[in-house]
Image: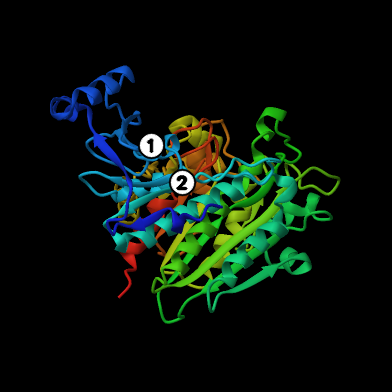
């Protein structure tokens, strides 16, 4: 992980190379006031101030960089510039960095754990006149990098036990944080659906419920739940090989939940935090749960298994039930839950479901404010009929092949009892192609929005 704190520094007038931000609308005015050598150099580089376009012009012993930026600037607009520049210290001319600091930092993050020869360090330091905002940018960049690193780690090196270790590592950084791990007979007795999903892998990779608690018990309790399926073969309803290829990322919800919990503790929000991660591997074996089995949930509801590849909602349901036993004031869950959400919204937009309109509006507004958009889909009650079972209280798989993301969310809603504000984020946690500041691979989608919402709801002081 990058040392982000060293890459964003207060501007005290120290020597720095200059970055000139230019929008397409402002290019003519810039050229009119520039010298002939600058105009010729920019023309030779075909610089049109398109967003993400970068051009450099020699200037004395150094150089001046021209960065194409849109008029309305978001977190990723300076990332291409950071990627193009050599090591050094830089200052943005005429304006401050603002939200673009995030992209500057994350453009320098590398996951090189498996590289025999990692890319040499090339630190690009950016100066900012907004010193008070540095810690916030650095913390969010580190949280996003944590999600990326966890999701990018192959399943052979990241199973339930390693996920528990990641939670414990975060807990050790924060006074008063405690971690409890439920396993074995206690898991089977108390969380039967988590145990059933992880049963086939239990000899090599024991299923777990990982819980972290932190904060003053007198403060409002918030519960954050993350799907921790460390690898998903599909179970006996086995996925094709192409469908399994990215299933190391099926713990992406857990990565988001852990990163968000870390942000809450880093900022010392006035809340009582309860993080819950059901961590399993959905494997194939003689004792795997089967299509047609009926499982008893922690909540007491019986669940008929229509598809063993709809396992994420099962482990989430038991964890949600546990979270609600502590009467939280707010419940969020993150999960790489359905391919249907990706068919509907593509890889960039997490599907948001919420039983509370105010919470949904707050999350959508937070997504717009942070450049981390969400898209709300309905908890359409008539589709609950698709989850009917002839033998049990509910089926885990919707019938008919329609509205898969909605029926998955409706399944979870069955276990959200009482009037607790609840939101479910069905995120992809993956970039299928590289963009500036966002390499192909693990991605935090919905994290910044959720963090912005929590800061607004539970401000410090």
Left or right: 247 as drawn, with respect to 252: right
Say which element carries label 2. Answer: helix
* The furthest residue to the front: 61
x and y, in percent, of residue 133 in the image? 32, 60
Q: Are marks 2 and 1 in contact (CB under 8 Å)?
A: no
Judge by depth and name the residue closer to the eye, 316 or 263.
Answer: 263
x and y, in percent, of residue 245 in the image? 68, 33
Residue 143 image label: none
Rendered position, 276 above or below 403: below
Mark 1 = which residue? Answer: 81
Judge by depth and name the residue closer to the eye, 121 or 440.
Answer: 121
- Nearer to us of marks 2 and 1 is 1
What is the quadrant of residue 283 in the picture?
A: top right
Of marks 2 and 1, which one's residue comes earlier in the chain?
1
Image mark count: 2
Left or right: 320 as drawn, with respect to 136: right
Left or right: 95 as drawn, with respect to 409: left
x and y, in percent, of residue 139 in the image? 44, 59
Residue at the spot x=16%, y=24% of the render?
28
Is residue 296 at all visible to an observer of this figure? no
* The furthest residue to the right: 286
Crowdedness near tag 2: few (<14), some (14–19) or many (≥20) residues, C-alpha within 10 Å: many
Say which element carries label 1. Answer: helix
Crowdedness near tag 1: few (<14), some (14–19) or many (≥20) residues, C-alpha within 10 Å: many
Residue at the spot x=50%, y=39% of the render?
405
Residue at the spot x=72%, y=29% of the render?
241
x and y, in percent, of residue 350 in the image? 44, 42
Mark 2 = which residue? Answer: 106
Is residue 192 at all visible to an observer of this figure? yes
Label 2 and label 1: CA atoms lie apart by 12 Å
Judge by depth and name the residue closer to the eye, 221 or 85.
Answer: 85
């Amino acid at each position: 992980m990058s040392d982000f704190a060293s890459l964003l520094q207060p501007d005290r007038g120290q020597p720095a190379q200059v970055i000139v931000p230019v929008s397409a609308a402002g290019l003519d005015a810039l050229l009119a006031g520039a010298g002939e050598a600058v105009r010729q150099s920019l023309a030779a580089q075909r610089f049109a101030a398109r967003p993400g376009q970068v051009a450099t012009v020699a200037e004395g012993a150094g150089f001046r960089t021209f960065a194409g930026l849109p008029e309305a600037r978001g977190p990723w607009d300076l990332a291409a510039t950071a990627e193009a520049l050599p090591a050094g210290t830089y200052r943005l001319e005429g304006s401050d960095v603002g939200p673009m600091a995030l992209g500057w930092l994350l453009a320098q993050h590398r996951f090189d754990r498996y590289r025999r020869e990692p890319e040499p360090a090339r630190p690009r330091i950016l100066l900012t006149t907004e010193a008070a905002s540095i810690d916030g940018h650095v913390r969010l960049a580190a949280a996003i990098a944590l999600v990326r690193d966890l999701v990018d780690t192959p399943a052979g090196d990241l199973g339930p036990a390693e996920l528990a270790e990641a939670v414990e590592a975060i807990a050790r950084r924060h006074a008063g944080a405690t971690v409890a791990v439920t396993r074995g007979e206690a898991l089977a007795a108390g969380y039967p659906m988590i145990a059933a999903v992880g049963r086939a892998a239990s000899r090599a990779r024991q299923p777990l419920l990982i819980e972290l608690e932190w904060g003053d018990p007198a403060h409002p309790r918030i519960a954050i739940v993350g799907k921790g399926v460390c690898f998903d073969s599909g179970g006996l309803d086995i996925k094709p090989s192409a469908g399994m290829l990215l299933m190391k990322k099926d713990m992406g919800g857990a990565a988001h939940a852990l990163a968000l919990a870390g942000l809450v503790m880093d900022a010392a929000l006035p809340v009582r935090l309860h993080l819950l991660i059901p961590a399993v591997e959905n494997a194939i074996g003689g004792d795997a749960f089967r299509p047609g089995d009926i499982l008893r949930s922690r909540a007491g509801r019986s669940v008929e298994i229509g598809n063993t590849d709809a396992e994420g909602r099962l482990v989430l349901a038991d964890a949600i039930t546990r979270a609600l036993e502590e009467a939280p004031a707010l419940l969020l869950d993150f999960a790489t839950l359905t391919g249907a959400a990706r068919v509907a919204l593509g890889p960039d937009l997490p599907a948001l479901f919420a039983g509370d309109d105010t919470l949904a509006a707050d999350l959508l507004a937070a997504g717009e404010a942070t450049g981390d958009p969400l898209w709300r889909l309905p908890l359409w009650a008539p589709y609950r009929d698709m989850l009917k079972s002839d033998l049990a209280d509910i089926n885990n798989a919707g019938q008919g092949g329609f509205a898969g993301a909605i029926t998955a969310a409706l399944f979870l809603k069955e276990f959200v009892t009482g009037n607790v504000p609840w939101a479910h984020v069905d995120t992809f946690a993956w970039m299928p192609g590289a963009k500036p500041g966002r390499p192909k691979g693990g991605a935090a989608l919905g994290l910044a929005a959720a963090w912005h919402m929590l800061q607004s709801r539970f401000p410090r002081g």
